[in-house]
Image: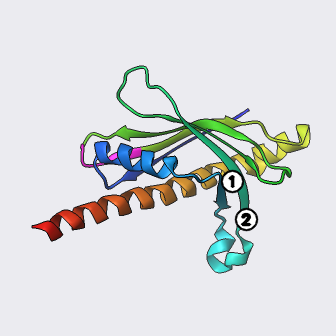
Amino acid sequence: MTNVVQRHLLACPYGLAKTYLQFELGSDQPLWHLRVPTPAASVNPLVEFAKDVDVTVRPSVDPMHFDQPWNITWAPHGGGPYPTFVGTLTVRADEDWNVAALELVGSYEPPMGAAGKVFDVLFGARLASATAKDLLAEIGQRLEAHYHRDEAAKVALT
């Protein structure tokens, strides 16, 4: 089992970030396109690895009733030698209430037995971490875009 833990800071207040994430995850998006950023992709975008995954997202319960965690699972669309990820996606408060942190915590079992475990040790875990980081950045951009639109609308009303 390989664990993945990634955080992404949001230029958005904590309370609003939770609302925006609920909106984003509440929209029907059963298929996501995950990218695996690679150094070669910056030179040639055709080198970038990508995979469509079927995603299941369900609200979870925070025993402290502070954060709104979401149980998240994704599996390769159409199969293939890719792992199934199980974890939680949560907006967490930061020291400054005008900033929030988007956090992804979970794990996966490398496919293909012993060969998959060797690949995971050599490359897979780093690819998974980079993919999670890229996913959080993409979700973060959408949440921040909601915030900036709302703030611009407030200014336009005055």
Q: Is residue 152 left or right of residue 85?
A: left
Residue at the spot 65% in from the left edge and 61% down from the top edge: 35
Q: Of marks 2 and 1, which one's residue comes earlier in the chain? A: 2
Q: Is residue 66 left or right of residue 78?
A: left
How many neighbours does mark 1 have within 10 angstroms: few (below 14), some (14-19), or many (20 or more)?
A: some
Of helix, strand and loop, which mostly describes the magenta segment? Answer: loop
Q: Which residues are magenta?
A: 97-101
Q: Amino acid at mark 2?
A: Phe
Q: Image height check: is 1 above or below 39?
A: above
Separation of residues labelled 2 and 1 (CA atoms): 10 Å
**Residue 49 circle label:** 2
Q: Pointers 2 and 1 in contact (CB under 8 A)?
A: yes
Between 122 and 99, the one nearer to me in the picture: 99
- x, y percentage for residue 58? 56, 36
Residue at the spot 39% in from the left edge and 32% down from the top edge: 67
Q: Quadrant of the N terminus?
A: top right
Q: Image height check: is 22 above or below 151?
A: above
Closest to the camera, between mark 2 and mark 1, is 2
Q: Amino acid at mark 1?
A: Leu
- The residue indicated by pointer 1 is 127
Q: Is residue 4 left or right of residue 50?
A: left
- x, y percentage for residue 132? 59, 50
Residue at the spot 69% in from the left edge and 53% down from the top edge: 127
Q: Quadrant of residue 131?
A: bottom right
**Residue 58 circle label:** none
- The color scheme shown is rainbow
- x, y percentage for residue 110? 79, 40
Q: In the structure shown, which secondary structural element does the residue marked by tag 2 occupy?
A: strand
Residue at the spot 29% in from the left edge and 63% down from the top edge: 148
